[in-house]
Amino acid sequence: MVAGDVVRALAVASVVVGTWRAGLVACALFLLVLGGTLVPRAIGAPAGLDVAYCSTLLFAAWSAQLEWYAAVDWLDLAVHAVATGLVAVMALLALVRWRVVAEPAAAPDRIVLVTGLGATAAVLWEVGEWAGHTFLDPRIYVGYADTIGDLAAGLVGSVVAAVVLARRS
């Protein structure tokens, strides 16, 4: 058992508690989070990255369920920045481990890859929010300012994560 497994166990519990507390949309959200938390284990991510990534995904989901984003103005953008940066780093690690891309040797290559992966993840997340609002639950908040802010925060988070990764590698 590794430290990230504790967070994965909390993700399993969150599926049950979230479904009981808030219904099928919460169930879908926490199942998505649970699936995401399995990625670091599957690819053998470093423990620190595993815990940071999984904890951030779980925090983001519970923040939505507990309506913390509505209560704390800046929290949504902060979570988008941190989560997208970590998702981008995890995506690069997964692509390298699965031999889809070669390990980028040069720092500028890592920066471009992580930033691009993060930007793509941010766009996909916003499309998912729109689809959730349109087809599942109109209470899922979407709007022009929210979408643009989330995309900008995700991009900034990806750039910061890319620079940190490039400096550490």
Image: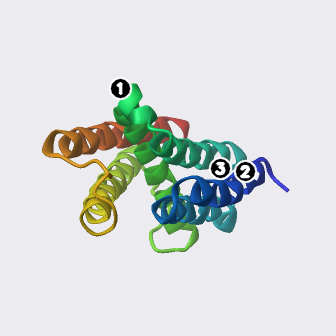
Spot occupied by residue 50 in the image (x, y as percentages of width and height): 65, 50
Tag 1 residue: 74
Q: How is the image coloured?
A: rainbow
Determine the residue positioned at 55% across, 73% down.
98
Q: Are marks 3 and 2 in contact (CB under 8 Å)?
A: yes
- Does 127 sit left or right of 157 as displayed? left
Q: Secondary structure at mark 2?
A: helix
Task: Please tell me which residue lies in front, 163 or 72.
Answer: 72
Residue farthest to the right, as pictured: 1
The quarter of the rendered structure image containing the N terminus is bottom right
* Residue kind at label 2, given as amino acid type: Gly
Give residue 35's position: percent from left, percent from top: 58, 66
Q: Residue at x 28, y 57 (%)?
A: 138
**130 displayed left or right of 61:** left
Task: Tell me how far mark 1 sits from mark 2, CA to CA.
Answer: 27 Å
Q: Earlier in the sequence, mark 3 or mark 1?
A: 3
Q: Residue at x 18, y 46 (%)?
A: 143
